Amino acid sequence: MNHLRLLLTALLLAVLATICALAQTPTTSCPNNPQDDDLIAGSTCDQYNTLTSGQFQATPLIDGSMQDYGDLDHNVVSLYGTYGNNEKTASGAAHSHYAQGSTLAGQIAPLCPDGTTNCSDASKAIVFLYIGFSNTDIEIGGGSSDAWDNQDPHQAHLNGQPCSTLCENLNNPDMVPAWNQLAGDPTIQQSLMYLIYSPSTPLVGPHVVVFNGALGGQTLSKWDPTSIGYYAQSGANCPWDHQSSLDSECNYVRVKNDLTRNFYTQTDHYTEAQVQAVFIKTADSFPQCDLKKLYCSPGYTEPDAYTAERYLGDILRYLKCCKTNPYGTPPVPRYPNLKQVFITSRIYGGYGNGTAHGCLNPEPFAYELGFTVQRAIVAQINQTNNITNTDPYSGQLDYTVAPWFDWAPYLWASGTNISPGNLLNWCDSTTTHDPHCANNPGDVRYGDLIYPNYFGDHIHPTANGQAKVANQLLRWIQGTLPSAQSYISDWLGVGTSTPWIQK
């Protein structure tokens, strides 16, 4: 009987490995990959490439004092629009939203794979799922290859410039660490997974699973499973599991398969029922029109910040309810125990301006994505508190149709200028003369500086940029962020006797 059980277990693992092979078709985000989803031939970005590298400067939302951005809709420079920068110290609707997040933090507890608590303690887990595009993937899990791998004969010139590649995640069957490092590159990538799980005692609780579901090229439209979602709109099959019936939910099916792949006991694998918090960091691809209408390509009138807000609204409603069920059965929530969603915007993208690959996410679009997040949060605050909501882009986002969501750490800073609010700045290979960037070859991918045929896109983070983001996220979960956003750690339970991030 024991032999039969072992045989069945082996067969199950083989099946799961096959599923994983389909679900995890390698996707990289580097200049050496002509099939990169971020670099589709024929995309245009002539209008905003009139900005030169590093030229765009603005006030980070976290440092704003509710001044007018100067666009046609008078967007407000702060994290919460007219509510200011701090929900905890605000009164009325904004504080109620903060309090709701704190209440939900107290409800997160380890769950069994079926979503109940009717199992042994060893079988319980809290999955903290991170989703997004290539930058997110590099920052959370690290890369297993560098830019121009196997092409540039001077590969040492490219050390510390990781590509977006698959992360193994915790308790993977490959018996390797949960984070990526690149053999042959002496740079130790300080990704979030590395920072959390490389110490002998992990920096989160024994039940908490920080799980990387991000992947290169997976911009906002590809996480939007509604009728305007990328795969549904294009008619393309899911590239990871080839099930055309699930086209609009490709990324979520991939994440489900990845969760299922990782066994943390002999019989238990992670499940969607254990996902209780989600982190989102991504953007819309090939932005074409800015809020001030200064850099709009011909034929484009809706600012990309608003297009991104449409996608984000769709995604949030989907996270609440529901995935498509086969055979005509009623839809059910994909993450039935989801309590909190945290969202952040991009790092500085101005070094991509004026380059051949400035289409990715240059300025002012990277900066203006902060207004996307701000406006969606304010819409939820207003709708939940029966305040007139005049935002025509987010759609309905009150608690009846969307999960509670709010800011994760705000990461944008104005180039080399250090933001007082997050103490960050962003350097490029062209800014080493700046005293704030001394001895920093670049936080964004600069390529081979000696042999320029092996170029960088100046958008994706290097190991230096990765470490800046990962350290900010680590400070968030440990409650040591700078004062301007320190209170958001309350939503993880930090400071209470039983913070969920340490359960």
Image (cartoon, rainbow, N blue to C red):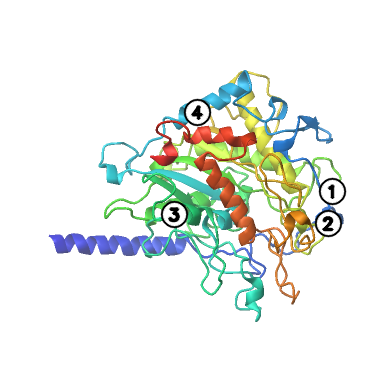
Q: CA distance from mark 4 to mark 1?
A: 40 Å
The amino acid type of the residue labelled 2 equals Asn
Q: Say which label, 1 or 2, has the lower sequence index.
A: 2
Q: Is residue 308 visible?
A: yes
The residue indicated by pointer 4 is 102
Q: How many residues crowd around disc 1 within 10 Å: few (fewer than 14), some, or many (20 or more)?
A: many
From mark 1 to mark 3, how far is it between C-alphas? 43 Å
- Of mark 4 and mark 3, the one earlier in the sequence is 4
Lower position in the chain sequence, tag 4 or tag 1: 4
Compared with residue 313, is residue 135 higher up or lower down, i.e. above or below?
below
Which label is found at residue 197?
3
From this view, report whether residue 330 is shown above or below residue 15. above
Looking at the image, tell me whether mark 4 or mark 2 is earlier in sequence order: 2
- Asked whether residue 394 appears in the rendered view, the answer is no
Q: Is residue 251 shown above or below 479?
A: below
Report the quarter where the C terminus lies: top left
- List x then y, in percent, for residue 334: 45, 41
Query: Residue 470, image x and y in percent?
Result: 57, 51
Residue that mark 1 sits on: 295
